[in-house]
Image (spheres, helix red, strand yellow):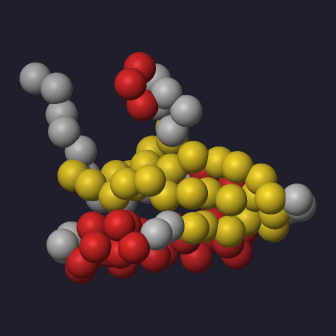
Amino acid sequence: MIWKVRWDKKIEKMLDDLPKHVVGSFYDWTKALERDGMEATRKLPGYHDEKLNGKLSGLRSVRLGKAYRVFYFEMAEGTIKIAQVEKVSKHEYKK
């Protein structure tokens, strides 16, 4: 299975405002996904890929560190699976 990660200029602007280590983790995640596929990348312990519920139903999130997450959804274009990035942001914890 071939996987690609896509994002638009809105995501580029978000990345510009994030700490460098978070941006590095984002690019590491994209490389791992495109190189090894989704199944293998989800097994990596640091990312904690999870399906979201409630208002964010339909999205998944991946940890880029203790406080930051990438939110994406999956789709297909022919034989290629796409991880479409919707948001990269600081995780808001409920108190």
Left or right of 82 on screen, residue 26: left
- Count how many numbered circles sit on residues in the image: 0
Position above or below: 59 against 75: above
**Farthest-out residue, right:** 79
**Residue visible at 37% across and 54% down?**
87
Q: On the rendered structure, is 47 left or right of 93?
A: right
Taking depth in this image into account, of 27 and 6 the one nearest to the observer is 6
Can you tell which quarter of the image residue 6 is in?
A: bottom right
* Left-right relation of 51 to 91: right
In terms of depth relative to the viewer, which is nearer, 61 or 17?
Answer: 17
Quadrant for residue 26, please give it: bottom left
Identity of the residue drawn at 46% across and 23% down: 53
Q: Residue furthest front?
A: 9
- Residue at the farthest left position: 95
**Residue 57 visible in the snapshot:** yes
Residue 35 at x, y = what percent? Answer: 70, 75
Q: Nearer the viewer, residue 57 or 50?
A: 57
Residue at image x 34%, y 58%? Answer: 88
Left/right placement of residue 38 relative to residue 9 reads: right
Quarter that holds the N terminus: bottom right
User: Does residue 48 appear in the picture of this structure?
Assistant: no
**Residue 75 appears at what percent x and percent y?**
70, 49
Which quarter of the rendered picture does the C terminus lie within?
top left
Q: Residue at x 68, y 59 (%)?
A: 82
Q: Quadrant of residue 40?
A: bottom right
